[in-house]
């Protein structure tokens, strides 16, 4: 029973911390363009590539 005195506030605190971080990420627009990030990996970026041809 004594362990519940520590575990319940710790679980509530971690849950509120996670909710706060999620809301902060929504506010800072981390999830704004999900399709752009998914399709960006399919295309080559030729400006960063070094020319190795003779």
Image: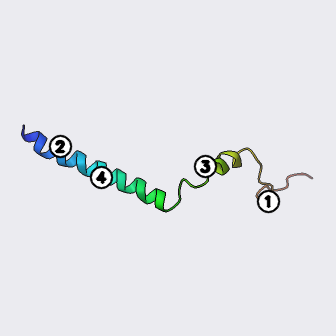
Residue 39 relative to residue 9: left or right: right
Dot 4 and dot 1 residues touching (CB under 8 Å): no
Q: Position of residue 36 (x, y in %)?
A: 67, 51
CA distance for labels 2 and 3: 36 Å
Quadrant (top left, top right, bottom left, bottom right) of the N terminus: top left
Per the image, label 4 sits on a secondary structure element best described as helix
Determine which of the numbered discs, if any, sits on residue 35 in the image: none
First reached walking from the N terminus: tag 1 or tag 3:
3
4 and 2 marks in contact (CB < 8 Å): no
**Residue toward you, 14 or 46:** 14
- The residue carrying mark 2 is 7
**Vertical order, 2 against 53 (above or below):** above
Which residue is under mark 4?
16
Disc with the residue nearer the chain's start (1 vs 2): 2
- Sequence-earlier tag: 4 or 3: 4
What is the C-alpha distance between the residues marked 1 and 2?
53 Å
């Amino acid at each position: 029973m004594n362990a519940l005195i520590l575990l319940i506030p710790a679980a509530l605190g971690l849950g509120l911390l996670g909710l706060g971080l999620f809301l902060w990420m929504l506010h800072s627009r981390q999830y704004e363009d999900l399709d752009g990030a998914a399709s960006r990996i399919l295309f080559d970026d030729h400006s960063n590539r070094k020319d190795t041809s003779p």
